[in-house]
Amino acid sequence: MAIALVSCAGHRAPSSSLNQPPSIRLNHHTVSRGDTLYSIAWRYGQDFRKLAAINGIKPPYNIYPGQRLHLNGKVPRQVASSSPVARKKTVAKPAPTQKAIPAKNTKSLTKSSTRQKPQSKRTGTIHWRWPVRGQVISKFRSGDPLRKGVDIAGEKGESVSAAADGTVIYAGSALRGYGKLLIVKHSDVYLSAYAHNHRLLVKEGSKVKAGQRIAELGSSGTNRDKLHFEIRKNGQPVDPLAYLP
């Protein structure tokens, strides 16, 4: 099948549904239409930098349909010793320990809280804020593939905001189970995702600010109107309630 490569943000392959089910037992992934290096790394819970290094892919991380990517393996020695990513990793300071947030602050945000001045919580240089105001109807559970983030109830068309400053690295619907999805890169360590949107308002490569309207809440890929929100640290899901104010 001849498929033209579409270079959106320098790394996207044309979009369609994914046929390869996610599994930690898989050692390879065959690139399909709509895949990006970022979305593949997200799909398998990997750090996009490591996945790129294993497969010898350099920025801007161009991939193409039919390409076979290794999901496991060692980072080449020359890459591990000389790449900016590797060097940065060796001198990086440990991330501050996250303190548990009292339940009364994380169960839901009432109508009165929507009238208060937006608050943020700082992680290093990143200031996190809630992407939407509403009741948390499903919480993160470590190790549960269906609970990698939080679900926040809302109404169709309600504004979804960026949780922190960053760059949109994925905008599409090719990642099964997420509906219309946005992934924002905040740093080499942290990414966030906004799923099941009704409409996406930003494109890949867009620079966004914390609190900026980036999507409309919806029910794409699910059975009710809600926002599914995730934070990934070095490719691994973490509890958003430990980061949100």
Image (cartoon, helix red, strand yellow):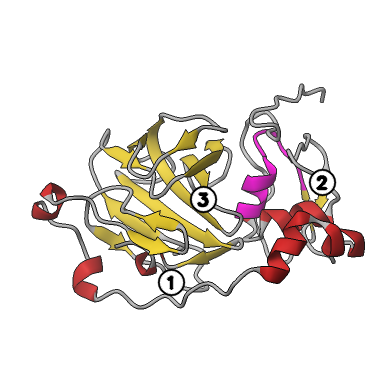
Q: Amino acid at mark 3?
A: His
**Mark 3 or mark 1: whose residue is earlier in sequence:** 1
Q: How far is mark 2 from mark 1, CA to CA? A: 32 Å
52 vs 78: above or below: above
- The crowd level at tag 1 (other Cα within 10 Å; few <14, some 14-19, many 20+) is some
Magenta highlight range? 30-42
Specify whether residue 33 is painted magenta.
yes
Location of mark 3 (residue) = 186
Left or right relative to 243: residue 70: right
Q: Is 195 included in the stretch rendered in magenta?
A: no
The residue lying at 76 percent from left, 63 percent from top is 87
* Left or right: 53 in relation to 150: right
Residue 188: % across, % down? 61, 55
The correct choice, above or below, for 242 with respect to 150 in the image is below
Residue at figure coordinates x 85%, y 59% from the top left: 82
> How many numbered marks are there?
3
Does the image show residue 85?
yes
Q: Is residue 99 left or right of residue 170?
A: left
Q: Which is more foreground, mark 3 or mark 2?
A: 3
Q: Which x, y percent locates residue 148?
A: 47, 63
Name the kind of residue labelled 1 in the image. Arg
Kindly report which numbered mark, 2 or 1, lies closer to the viewer in this rendering: 2
Residue annotated with mark 2 = 57
Pinpoint residue 102: horizontal percent, then vertical percent. 24, 76
Quadrant of residue 235 in the image?
Answer: bottom right
The image quarter in which residue 44 lies = bottom right
Could you give the CA–CA distance between mark 3 and mark 2, rounded to whole angstroms?
21 Å
Q: Which residue is mark 1?
A: 141
